[in-house]
Amino acid sequence: MVENQIKTILCIGAGYVGTPTMAVIADNCPEYKIIVVDKNIDKIRAWNSDSLPIYEPGLEDIIKRRRNKNLFFSEDIATSIKEASIIFVSVNTPTKKFGLGAGMASDLQFIELVARDIIKYAQEDKLVIEKSTLPVKTAEALSRVLHSNDKGLKFEVLSNPEFLAEGTAINDLQHPDRVLIGSMKTESGIESAKILRNIYTHWVPTEKIKLTNLWSSELSKLVANAMLAQRVSSINSISALCEKTNADVEEVSHAVGMDSRIGSKFLNTSVGFGGSCFKKDILNLVYICRYYGLNEVADYWEQVVIINEYQQNRFVNKVIDKMFNTVVDKKIAVLGFAFKANTGDTRESPAITVTKMLLKERADVAIYDPKAIENAKLDLADYSQSNNLHFYNNAEDAIKDSHAILVLTAWDEFKELDFEEAYRTMKKPSFIFDGCNILQHEQLKNLGFNVNCIGKNLDRLKDDE
Ligand code: UDX
Ligand code: ADP
C-alpha cells in the first residue's frame, strides 16, 4: 500500500470508542476524510443530528467543527468499505452469553460479521485495524476470515487498543499516555504499523507510540484494565475492614497512594467498578488462563470480579440492615445510575445490581440521573410493569417522601443539593447512603440525617473523638 494513497479512513462501529476516536483523528488530520458507519441506522442519524446519541464532554464541539467537512457519518457500509484504504473495526465485543465459554469468553460474532462485510465489498487491499477490546489472538482469527476471500485481496491486520476512559475520552485521546500498535513482524506488517503511526504523529509525540507484536498489543489492553480494576477491588476489600475497625479508608488510601511506588490513582473506594471493559476484560483474561491450564492464575484474577460483586452486595445489605431490616414499600431515592460521572453509559453499572436487589426486597425505587435515565429504563426493562420502580427528571422529586437517599454515581450536582430542604421533604428517620463518598458527612449528620458511607464507620469514628 502506498502511503500517499491513504486519504480515506473508515471506522465500522459508531459507539463510545469509535466515534470519539475518529472525531479526534479528524480534528488533528484535516487532510484525511474520515467516515464512520454503523449497522444501527438510528445511531448514524443521531450522529448527523443536533441530538448526539452519546454524552461525552468535549465531543459535541469537535463533531460540530468537523462534521461534513472531513468527518462523515454514513449509512452506506458497502460504498464506505470500497472507498477506504484503512478500516478501523470498533464494534462491540460483549461477554459471550451462550455455549462454550459462556459468561467469560468474548462474543466475536460482531467482529466476524464485519470481516465478512469487508470481504464482500472490498475491491482492493486494505489495512484493517482492530480497535475493540478483543481476546488475545483474535487478530489472527480476523486475518484468517479476511484471507478466506476469493478475490486475491491482501489484508494486513493491526491491533491498536483504545485506552480512553469515558467521561474523559477526548482528553485521553488528545493526550494519550501511550499508543500501542501491534503488527505481525513481517515486512508488510511493520510497514503497515508505520502507516498507522504516521497518522498518530500528527498530534502524539513519537516516543509515546510503541510498535509491538500483535499478541503483546492485544494482551496489554486486557492486563492494563485488569490491573486498574484490581486496584479498585483491593481498596474496596480494605473498605470492608475499615468499617469493622476504626480506620478510615480514605486516610488509608491516601497514605498508601503517597508511596511513589504505588501512586494515588484508582484507589478511590466505591460501591464497585462498572463500565463496559473492566469485568469483561478480566473474565476474558481468566478464560484465556483456564484455556492454557493456568488455573491458579485464573483464580487470582477472578477474585477481582468476585470482590466487586461482594462490594455491591455488601452495600445493599447495609442499607437493609440500617433501615431496620426491611425496605418493603419504602421509597428509596437512587441518585446516579451511570457507571461513573460525566457519562450516560450504564453498562455494568453497580446501580443496576443495587436497584434489582432493592426491587427484590420490594422497596419503592425512585431513580434520577442527569444523563443516564434512558439507559436506566432499558437496563430495567424487565421491571417496567413494576409499581415499585419510578424514574424522575430531577433529584428533588426523587427524594421527596423517601426514607433514604443512595448516591451511586459521583455527579458533581449531587454535592450541591440542598440537603436541608431534602431532609424537610423526607420521611423520618431519614437515611443517606453515600456509595461514592462525595458528600459532607458531618454536615449531613448535623442536619439530622442518619449517614453511612463506604469504608468508615461514622458512628464509631465519632465515639472515638
Ligand atoms: C476503563 C479504562 O480506564 C480505559 O483505559 C479503558 O480503555 C476502558 O476501561 P472506563 O471503563 O471508561 O475506562 O472508566 P474508568 O475511569 O476506568 O472507571 C471504571 C470504573 O471504576 C468506574 O465504575 C469507576 O467509578 C470505578 N473506579 C475508578 C473506582 O471505583 N475507583 C477508582 O479509584 C477509579
Ligand atoms: P464500544 O464501547 O466498544 O464502542 P458500542 O456498543 O458503544 O461499543 O459500539 C459498538 C457499535 O458497533 C454499535 O453501535 C453497534 O451497532 C456497531 N456494530 C456492531 N456490529 C456491527 C457490524 N457488523 N457492522 C456495523 N456496525 C456494527
Image (tube, rainbow, N blue to C red):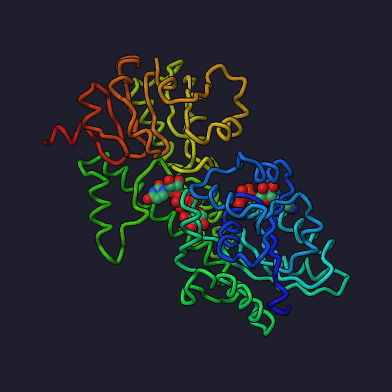
Residue shown at 31%/19% (left/top)? 421
Residue 296 seen by the camera: no
Rendered-image quadrant of the C terminus: top left
Residue shown at 49%/50% (left/top)? 58
Q: Residue lying furthest bottom in this view?
A: 187
Examine the rendered structure and indicate whether residue 58 appears above or below residue 191: above
Percent position (x, y) of residue 93? 64, 53
Examine the rendered structure and indicate whether residue 234 appears above or below residue 378: below
**Considering depth in this image, is 13 or 110 the residue closer to the camera?**
13
**Considering depth in this image, is 114 or 261 the residue closer to the camera?**
114
Q: Residue lying furthest left in this view?
A: 465
Residue shown at 54%/71% (left/top)? 202
Among the 4 quarters of the image, the one containing residue 194: bottom right
Rendered-image quadrant of the N terminus: bottom right
Percent position (x, y) of residue 112? 75, 58
Among the 4 quarters of the image, the one containing residue 126: bottom right
Residue 226 seen by the camera: yes
Q: Residue lying furthest right in this view?
A: 150
Examine the rendered structure and indicate whether residue 236 appears above or below residue 201: above
Examine the rendered structure and indicate whether residue 249 appears above or below residue 220: above
**Considering depth in this image, is 266 or 102 the residue closer to the camera?**
266
Percent position (x, y) of residue 415? 33, 34
Percent position (x, y) of residue 123? 84, 68
**Considering depth in this image, is 438 or 434 the residue closer to the camera?**
438
